Image (cartoon, rainbow, N blue to C red):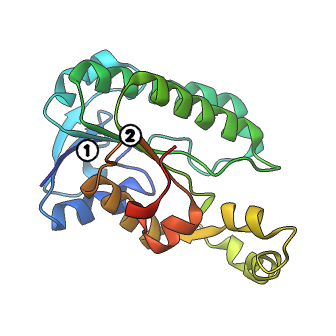
Amino acid sequence: MATVFIAGGTGYIGRRTIPRLLQRNHRVVALVRPGSERRLTGGCELVCGDPLERDSFAAAVARADTFLQLVGVPHPSPSKAQQFLHVDLRSARESIGAAVAARIGHFVYVSVAQPAPVMRAYQAARAEGERLLRGSGLRHTVLRPWYVLGPGHRWPYALLPVYWTLERLPSTRASARRLGLVTIDQMVDAIVAAVESPPAGGSRIVEVPDIRQTRISTALAG
């Protein structure tokens, strides 16, 4: 049983991950902004604070052995380039700093598939978050989905025939697989598997094909 501190628990992925962790008897300590407490499921411990200011939550991180970083701008688009820096990257920096101070045993970071021909500001912010994590000395897992299908996030289903074709052409197979679609259930399964199976070495990167199959134990270390 792990004690998991979650930043970003009220978001699209977080609200579905917390119940799964609780079902598997993990203890969850969730960071929540004041006024958003009702958006979290019962059974987890709440810490009111600002994910952009580590001093508001750092003391509570010491309760955990695993840190799960899920903070991000909802519905990313090219028009939100500055928000990626102010929210995604800044929250990652604050979370990593708090985790280092608390000597967290395992940091799980949901990043984004890269490289890709679009959403470059988003990729750059997440890539910098990964760089900070590598330099932190923390044992960590980085998950790199591209688009997570689920309620309110279904429009890419129309692209499935295109993906099917691209994955079968030698010239586009690698990029189509790297930038493939995953479901919210696959994403949650991969996160839970990462929490329950920390990397033996210092780091691990989990790409889309492994998220789809939840083959955490066989993902290459990064």
Q: Disc number at residue 140? A: 2
45 and 128: which one is in front?
A: 128
* Residue type, numbered disc 2: His
**Count of numbered badges drawn on the protein:** 2
Q: Is residue 150 visible?
A: no
Say left or right for 61 vs 71: left
Residue at horizontal 60%, vertical 29%?
A: 128
Query: On the image, numbered disc 1 is attached to which residue?
Result: 37
Residue 80's x, y, as percent? 70, 37
Return the residue nearer the eye: 217 or 178: 217
- Check residue 24 in the rendering and tell me which mark sits there, or answer none: none
Above/below status of 96 relative to 76: above
Q: Return the disc, 2 or 1, that comes first in the chain's sequence.
A: 1
**Residue at position x 31%, y 22% in the image:** 100
Q: Residues within 10 Å of mark 2 (few under 14, many from 20)?
A: many
Looking at the rendered structure, the kind of residue marked 1 is Glu
